[in-house]
């Protein structure tokens, strides 16, 4: 497998913990997945990845982190203290998560919490390794066991020198535990071997004595004829294979995976519930600007009375013209607008295009093009960079000191739906329109450039 092999352990001196009769290391993928999703990558990498051999009596522990591997006992005292403090903190976080899940009303969440509670245990500090700056624990989910190894001790020759035993003691912690029963087996005597040899010798003497006593007894020769039994009938042909055997095996494997899948499902449900609680509803859209007052038609004047003698009336000065739009310098196609509100929208007549922008982080970029007549009525067309186009009617009206440009909800081609936008434009010192846009959830700023 890809990764770094830390150590190989056996069941000598330790006892695996588990839930519902299954050791925790057989569900390491689900356990490390829950820790990674709820606490982060550093907590998940604290737990080494177990790889049992075919017999299930030995486990190789791996980590996917590259770098130098240092056992705990080879570290300096100061580094041991800091590493042990970090390990205790990470283990405490896992234990707190276990307590939270155990308090859940869901049975699957309680099962996951019990598994995480046992995961935070380790036999001793000798099962801690340092890979670069990441602490890693092997044999997690185990506890010390004074009963000894579950494996049969290997045979040691009687002539083996006694100096070979201290050399094994310098190996990794898990290997040191495995060599204890071997040394005891080599030094232990066999008190039952003496009595076994005495019994075999007595049986041999009895057989020899019976042979010689038979030669002395007056027994005639045995002339009975023994008839051999008939040969047995041929065996019956084997029954045809049962197709349900393979299906039952697959059914058993699926039923064995059911607790793991239930635990994963419970964890995902809790995460979804927490994320739903964190989500806030979007702010309601701002109300559209009030429509302009209706234009009342002037009724015809009543018939005039007979003309009176002409009177000398002083001529009043003409009303001031509407505020003029400042002229644009050559090469500057940005929209300019009058500095005071007016009902004359002839400065908007034509088509205007915005800069390329994005409505939000999760929305594709594009640009909008507005086309108006002299009364401020027209249309809007927005083109995304992937070819999707949205078209809607648009109007421009002064509301107070700012010009408001609004479109409408519409369907896009070939797919999608457009939500209503509003542009709020105000003139600068040189008359250039500074526009800020908003919709139901986002805000942005753009410039309008004349197209034609």
Image: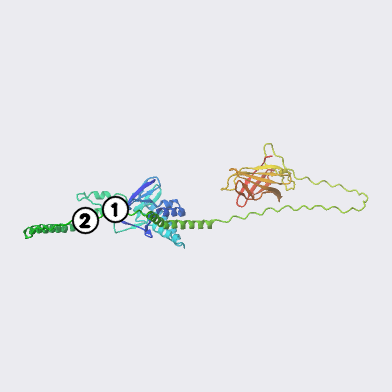
Figure label count: 2
Q: Which residue is mark 2?
A: 230
Q: Position of residue 257 (x, y in %)?
A: 41, 56
Q: Is residue 394 left or right of residue 73?
A: right
Q: Is residue 256 left or right of residue 431?
A: left
Quadrant showing the C terminus: top right
Do callouts 1 and 2 mark residues in contact (Cβ within 8 Å)?
no
Given this view, does label 1 or label 2 mark the residue nearer the observer? 2
Q: Which residue is mark 1?
A: 178
For residue 89, which quarter of the picture? bottom left
Q: Position of residue 229 (x, y in %)?
A: 20, 56
Q: Position of residue 208 (x, y in %)?
A: 10, 57
Q: Which of the marked residues, 1 or 2, is nearer the chain's N terminus?
A: 1
For label 2, the SS is loop
- Observer-nearest of 327 and 146: 146
- Observer-nearest of 426 and 379: 379
Farthest residue in the right direction? Answer: 309
For label 1, the SS is helix
For residue 239, which quarter of the picture? bottom left
């Amino acid at each position: 497998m890809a990764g770094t092999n830390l150590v190989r352990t056996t069941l000598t001196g330790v006892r695996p913990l588990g839930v519902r009769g299954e050791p925790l290391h057989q569900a390491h993928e689900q356990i490390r997945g829950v820790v990674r999703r709820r606490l982060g990558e550093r907590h998940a990498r604290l737990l080494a990845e177990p790889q049992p051999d075919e017999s299930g009596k030995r486990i190789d522990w791996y980590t996917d982190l590259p770098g130098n591997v240092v056992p705990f006992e080879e570290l300096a005292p100061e580094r041991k203290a800091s590493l042990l403090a970090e390990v205790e903190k990470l283990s405490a976080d896992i234990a707190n998560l276990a307590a939270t899940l155990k308090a859940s009303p869901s049975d699957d969440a309680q099962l996951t919490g019990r598994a995480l509670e046992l995961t935070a245990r380790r036999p001793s500090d000798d099962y801690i390794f340092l890979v670069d700056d990441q602490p890693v624990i092997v044999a997690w989910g185990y506890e010390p066991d004074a009963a000894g190894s579950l494996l049969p001790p290997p045979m040691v020759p009687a002539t083996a020198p006694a100096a070979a035993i201290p050399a094994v003691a310098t190996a990794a912690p898990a290997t040191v535990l495995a060599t204890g029963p071997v040394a005891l087996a080599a030094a232990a005597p066999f008190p039952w071997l003496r009595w076994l040899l005495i019994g075999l010798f007595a049986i041999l003497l009895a057989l020899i004595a019976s042979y010689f006593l038979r030669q002395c007894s007056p027994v005639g020769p045995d002339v009975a004829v023994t008839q051999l039994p008939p040969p047995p009938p041929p065996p019956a042909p084997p029954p045809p294979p049962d197709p349900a055997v393979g299906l039952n095996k697959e059914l058993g494997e699926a039923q064995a995976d059911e607790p793991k899948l239930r635990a994963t499902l419970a964890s995902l449900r809790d995460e979804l519930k927490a994320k739903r609680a964190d989500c806030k509803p979007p702010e309601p859209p701002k109300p559209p600007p009030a429509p302009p007052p209706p234009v009342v038609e002037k009724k015809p004047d009543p018939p005039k009375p007979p003309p009176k003698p002409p009177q000398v009336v002083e001529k009043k000065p003409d009303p001031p013209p509407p505020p003029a739009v400042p002229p644009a310098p050559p090469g500057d196609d940005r929209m300019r607008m009058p500095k005071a509100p007016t009902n004359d929208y002839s400065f908007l007549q034509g088509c205007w295009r915005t800069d390329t922008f994005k409505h939000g982080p999760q929305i594709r970029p594009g640009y909008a093009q507005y086309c108006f007549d002299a009364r401020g009525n027209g249309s809007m067309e927005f083109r995304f960079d992937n070819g999707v186009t949205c078209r809607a009617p648009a109007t421009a009206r002064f509301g107070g000191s700012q010009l408001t440009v609004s479109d409408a909800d519409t369907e896009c081609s070939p797919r999608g739906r457009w939500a209503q936008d509003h542009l709020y434009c105000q003139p600068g010192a040189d008359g250039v329109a500074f526009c800020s846009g908003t919709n139901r959830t986002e805000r942005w700023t753009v410039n309008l450039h004349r197209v034609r």
